[in-house]
């Protein structure tokens, strides 16, 4: 018999008993809430979030500061910044595959600790060198007929490049490998962690440059270097402790798939087998016997070179062989664009009469839309699946960019296709062309300092908006005849970021889910190389057409590249769906 039936004759005692049970349950729940919060704060996800936030904050501060420092050191000239950008892009392009292979071949904790140590120490030493150069610049310029200054500049660029390479390795290790293992290969949890890491990146992308910029403005460049130095030392200690704890509390991180060499017959056929944790194997064409015999007969330097070339070759082959190759290539093509808040677009906006304060507001709004894109990604993935989420994000991205195409032909646009013509107009039209040129001159000005930051693939950068330094020589107070064109441009750029970041997260998770564990490092290293390569192309486009009148042409070319990238993803999605239907 139930408690209620037994207690009915007692005149409602059951009500009191039920109320007591409810109160006790509420008390237990109240006591468990702080306990759950404490467990979460000590858990691997939170530790990864904090470690990632510290690392991203330091990276954003450093990327902003090193650009300003190089401009200040070379007398407001862009040469050092351009050299730094080319060195950074070229090094990642060449070393992406070897870095990824190193990540694959070594234990996870050693990779993370070594990358973290090299990155932070390189930034620390570079900050010390910069402080000495800023403090004793006149004295240094007098030594060795000025060659000591060249040595200092070279050391700064090399150390900054090493820090960037170490940051690339750390990003591949943590955000492309550790997160997958921590979530236990659960797709829902993986999507949540990816979205959270991207939100942290979006927030730090706005706040970190503002913070270090205020320090440099209110104090001095030397104080700014000291601030970055102190931040990196503290960040090094905290990140080291947190990553070590994550490695201890997640036993799966200590298990990595070994590289299994096959028998002699397979080796003679040129094959090497890699096995992932689930027992899956992939065959990499690689004539091991021939290569080893050749390398033993060569000097050490040539053996190192041959190993490097073979690693790059096998890395690119592994990338091409992946089932998500088209999706990764599609993402890389999105880097060839001027339709982002980087130096090119902000410089163009400045020539069209947009003030620095308004640009800052627009960048803040773009950060909010980027966060909305991460939220949309998690919602769409739950409702329609990962592949369909990429399709929806691609369509949304392209639809918003149509506004940018319309801006090229809208009132107030400075575009003039005739500027690309190699011949001049006849003399009888000189008066007409002169009047048209004067009309365009009302709202267009040459880029006198708009391309003065490193060629880094950062589509969401607010790093280059210090108008005191970057746009010091630009004319101000001039307004175009119509703001319709610039409004359409920024409306398209800002709204497109929703689909952009949702698509980026989609491809990132596809790479995480479909690449074998033993190849995650090398494949993601090649993906980083492709991103830098396509980003370099967009700077080459700007060098080829640098005037504001050319910007409309750059917009159209950018949309064509983005369309090609999304087309690659559509082809991948079609292939993936066919494979899914055939398996079912």
Image (cartoon, helix red, strand yellow):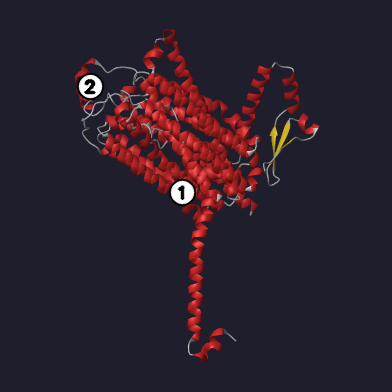
> Hey, which residue is sitting farthest top in the picture?
145
Where residue 525 sits: x, y (%)? 57, 33
**Residue ID at (41%, 39%):** 205
Determine if residue 457 is in view.
Answer: no
Please say if 360 is above or below 310: below
Judging by the rendered image, the residue that carries numbered circle 2 is 433
Residue indicated by mark 1:
392
| Label 2 vs 1, first from the N-terminus | 1
Q: Residues within 10 Å of mark 1 (few under 14, many from 20)?
A: some
Asked whether disc 2 touches disc 1, contact meaning CB atoms under 8 Å apart, the reply is no
Q: Nearer the viewer, mark 2 or mark 1?
A: 1
Looking at the image, which residue sits at the far bottom?
9
Q: Label for residue 544?
A: none
> Which residue is depicted at the point 50% across and 64% down?
31
| Residue 458 relative to residue 426: left or right | right
**SS at circle 2:** helix
């Amino acid at each position: 018999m139930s408690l209620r039936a037994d207690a009915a004759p007692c005149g409602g005692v059951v009500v009191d008993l039920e109320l007591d049970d409810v109160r006790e349950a509420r008390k237990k729940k109240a006591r468990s809430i702080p306990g759950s919060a404490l467990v979460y704060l000590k858990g691997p996800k939170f530790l990864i979030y904090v470690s990632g936030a510290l690392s991203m904050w330091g990276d954003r501060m450093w990327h902003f500061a090193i650009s300003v420092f190089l401009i200040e050191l070379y007398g407001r000239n862009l040469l050092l910044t351009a050299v730094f950008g080319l060195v950074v892009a070229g090094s990642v392009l060449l070393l992406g595959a070897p870095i990824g292979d190193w990540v694959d071949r070594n234990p996870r904790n050693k990779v993370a600790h070594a990358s973290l140590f090299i990155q932070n120490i390189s930034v620390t030493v570079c900050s010390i060198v910069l402080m000495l150069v800023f403090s004793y610049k006149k004295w240094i310029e007098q030594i060795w007929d000025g060659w000591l200054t060249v040595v200092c500049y070279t050391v700064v660029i090399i150390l900054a490049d090493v820090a960037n390479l170490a940051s690339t390795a750390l990003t591949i290790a943590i955000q492309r490998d550790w997160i997958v293992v921590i979530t236990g290969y659960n797709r829902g949890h993986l999507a949540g962690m990816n979205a959270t890491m991207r939100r942290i990146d979006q927030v730090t992308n706005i706040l970190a440059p503002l913070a270090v910029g205020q320090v440099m403005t209110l104090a001095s460049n030397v104080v700014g270097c000291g601030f970055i130095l102190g931040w990196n030392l503290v960040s090094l200690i905290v990140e080291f402790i947190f990553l070590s704890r994550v490695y201890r509390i997640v036993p799966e991180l200590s298990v990595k798939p070994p590289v299994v060499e096959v028998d002699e017959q397979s080796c003679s056929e040129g094959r090497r087998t890699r096995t992932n944790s689930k027992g899956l194997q992939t065959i990499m064409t690689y004539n091991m016997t021939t290569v080893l015999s050749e390398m033993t007969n060569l000097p050490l330097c040539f053996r190192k070179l041959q190993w490097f070339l073979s690693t790059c070759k096998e890395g690119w082959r592994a990338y091409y062989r992946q089932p998500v190759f088209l999706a990764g290539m599609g993402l890389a093509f999105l880097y060839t664009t001027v339709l982002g808040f980087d130096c090119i677009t902000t410089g163009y906006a400045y020539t069209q009469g947009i003030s620095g304060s308004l640009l800052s507001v627009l960048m803040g709004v773009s950060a909010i839309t980027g966060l909305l894109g991460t939220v949309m990604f998690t919602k769409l993935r739950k409702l329609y699946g990962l592949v369909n989420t990429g399709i929806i994000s691609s369509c949304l991205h392209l639809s918003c960019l149509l506004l940018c195409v319309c801006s090229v032909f809208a009132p107030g646009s400075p575009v003039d296709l005739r500027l690309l013509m190699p011949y001049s107009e006849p003399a009888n039209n000189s008066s007409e062309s002169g009047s048209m040129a004067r009309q365009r001159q009302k709202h267009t000005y040459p880029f006198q300092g708009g391309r003065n930051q490193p060629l880094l693939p950062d589509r969401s950068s607010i790093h280059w908006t210090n108008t005191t330094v970057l746009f010091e020589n630009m004319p101000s107070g001039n307004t175009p005849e119509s703001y319709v064109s610039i409004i359409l441009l920024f409306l398209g750029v800002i709204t497109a970021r929703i689909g952009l970041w949702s698509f980026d997260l989609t491809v990132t998770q596809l790479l995480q889910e479909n690449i074998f564990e033993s190849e995650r490092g090398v494949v993601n290293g090649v993906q980083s190389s492709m991103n830098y390569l396509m980003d370099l192309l967009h700077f080459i486009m700007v060098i080829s057409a640098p005037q504001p009148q050319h910007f409309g042409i750059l917009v159209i070319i950018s949309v064509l590249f983005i369309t090609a990238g999304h087309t690659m993803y559509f082809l991948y999605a079609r292939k993936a769906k066919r494979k899914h239907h055939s398996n079912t």
